Amino acid sequence: PPRPPSPEKQKAAPPDPPLPRQNNKTTPPSPPKVITDKNRILEFHRVGFLGEGGFARVYEVKDVRGTRHACKVVTKTSLKTKKAKTKLYAEIKIHRSLSHPNIVRFYECFEDDDNVYMTLELCHNGSLMDMLRRRRRFTEPEARFFLVQIIGACNYMHTHQVIHRDLKLGNLFLDSNMNIKVGDFGLAALIENPGERKKTICGTPNYIAPEVLFDTANGHSFEVDTWSIGVILYTLLIGRPPFQTKDVKDIYTRIRDNVYEFPPERRISPDARECITSTLTPDPNQRPTLLEIIASPFIDYGIVPPFIPMSAHDAPPDFR
Ligand code: ADP
């Protein structure tokens, strides 16, 4: 009979193959290692995986010159319905029209037989959500730094008739210099006629403005982004969103009734508190404008650091 393998041989045996994913979601096949368009003009080498969202997977790719980009990949099988196609075309049309230092740059869009590809500016430092998980909460100077850049990007979008509609920490990326890059225009809307109101209920529960949920007859407009900025500021300073509860229905009730609190142990400054409460004004017409937020005492009287050091990933920087 064959002898059992010697202990050394057993040790040298290859590791077990990874277990298949234990969920119902079918994982689409990976895009090719070398991604090219149909006319073979563009060529990117897939070098890593960055993350996945609702309907796309995002890879790190290298172009022929060696420059790294992010590449958002949408499978054509997920684009069978007219609705899905319209949604993707809207995202592409809006995102490629924007060019601002605090918005993820949109470079190319192309397809092969299986996928639609969008190459985007690579954000090396993840999202503010990833960073908040490590830090638990941010200092007021850091929050000011991020807020000024977010408002700059948002003001640019609004002057270009674009409402983002999904501003949240997970869509605020950080580049290699720790500057904000607003990304994911999957829910963005273009206001084509002045005074036009949007009626689609969309957004992420914690960040949704009350008029999106409760004034469906009237619709909503640019002020929904201002509301989300209030939610973002609260979340940066307190460490969790203001209306958060386990049950989504309860989140909506709290948003409707404007119920949230400032935990005393967090020692939020009166100026920060005032900035948050005014931005979270239920009536969109009474909400401050983006420029009014920038001119508020919280931003105007406080330290706005010139940059955020890399060390801030893990520990609060000292700006004094
Ligand atoms: P979806 O529109 O499907 O929600 P996202 O645009 O949010 O997809 O991207 C999904 C994930 O991919 C993000 O959470 C992030 O981890 C990663 N990602 C997206 N864009 C970039 C980028 N420009 N640079 C680095 N990582 C990115």
Image (cartoon, rainbow, N blue to C red):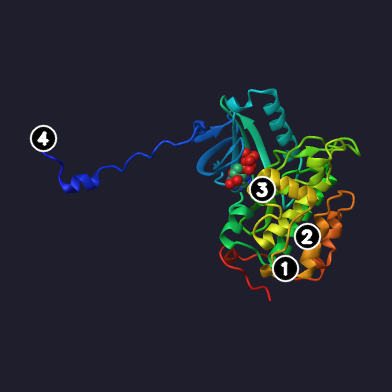
- Tell me how far mark 4 sits from mark 1, CA to CA: 73 Å
Query: Considering the image in quadrants, where does the C terminus appear?
Result: bottom right
The amino acid marked with disc number 1 is Ile
- Cβ atoms under marks 1 and 2 closer than 8 Å: yes
Number of the label disc, if any, that sits on residue 171:
3
Residue identified by numbered label 1? 268
The amino acid marked with disc number 4 is Pro
Q: Decide which of 134, 126 is in the foreground and name it.
A: 134
Residue lying at 74% horizontally and 50% vertically, measured from the top left: 254
Q: How many marks?
A: 4
Instruction: From the image, state whether disc 4 or disc 1 is nearer to you.
Output: 1
Q: Decide which of 54, 246 is in the foreground and name it.
A: 246
- Tell me how far mark 1 sits from mark 3, CA to CA: 25 Å
Residue 262 at what x, y percent from top left? 72, 63
Q: What element carries label 4?
A: loop
Residue identified by numbered label 2? 276
Looking at the image, tell me whether mark 4 or mark 1 is earlier in sequence order: 4
Residue identified by numbered label 4? 2
Residue 203 location, quadrant: top right
Q: Ligand 1: does it lie within 8 Å of the C-beta at label 4?
A: no
- Tell me how far mark 1 sits from mark 2, CA to CA: 10 Å
Looking at the image, tell me whether mark 1 or mark 3 is earlier in sequence order: 3
